[in-house]
Image (cartoon, helix red, strand yellow):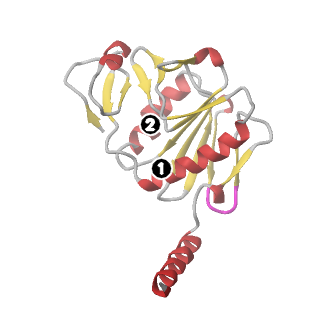
Amino acid sequence: MALKKLKEKYSYNDYKNWEDSEDWEIINGVAYNMSPSPSSEHQEIGSKILIELGNFLKNKECKLYYELDVILSDENILKPDIIVVCDKSKIKKRGIFGAPDLAIEILSPSTSIKDKTLKLELYKKYGVKEYWLVDPIYKDITVHIFEKDEIKLYTLNNENIPVNIFEKFAINMDDIFEKEETKQKKEEQNEIEQEAK
């Protein structure tokens, strides 16, 4: 977790005036650099979740966003991978002002500790209803349902993950993670096709 500068505390005013092209988050006044860019696997998983949520949310009140600024307070500005916001009054041109209903972080080596600790605490403190930690390495998803004080772990066993902020909507784990045997078969098929050319 790289820090930006040596200033003791940063605020939203500092954040919105930074001119560099890198992505930053401010947590309790401390600036964290979000580089390096997410891996291709991170992007693939994020895209699959976005498609599932996007299809469900068509013609519904709640809105879906990817890597949009979430301003929880003057000293807490986060950039989750995926959010769902159902309160339109929180949606502004520069980001979301207040807690989203659902926040999803896809873990990467450079941010996983921060996602599992500092950001989890902030999401709970500021009223996020549901928080997903998606682990591409172990192919599992930990779901924190803050309203019920519940934590659930979903693994690659054809499990459906209920999206608890909605009634009767779930995403199947197989639609997010590619099983190793499926991936291997596709690679073998690609090799066969290449040899046939």
Judging by the rendered image, the residue that carries numbered circle 2 is 117
Residue drawn 35% across the image and 33% down it: 23
Q: Locate residue 182, reporting x and y percent.
A: 59, 72
Query: Horizontally, is 155 left or right of 193 in the view?
Result: right
* Residue 43 marker: 1
Label 1 – label 2 distance at C-alpha? 22 Å
Does residue 146 lie above or below 136 as drawn?
above
Occupied quadrant, residue 100: top right
Query: Horizontally, is 99 left or right of 38 in the view?
Result: right
Q: Which quadrant holds the N terminus?
A: top left
> Which of labels 1 and 2 is toward the front?
1
Residue drawn 51% across the image and 81% down it: 193
Of callouts 1 and 2, the N-terminal one? 1
Q: Is residue 157 magenta?
A: yes
Label 2: element kind: loop
Q: Locate residue 73, reporting x and y percent.
A: 46, 16
Query: Horizontally, is 92 left or right of 161 in the view?
Result: left
Instruction: Give 182 or 109, whichever is nearer the viewer.
Output: 182
Q: Which residues are magenta?
A: 155-159
Residue drawn 40% across the image and 52% down it: 39
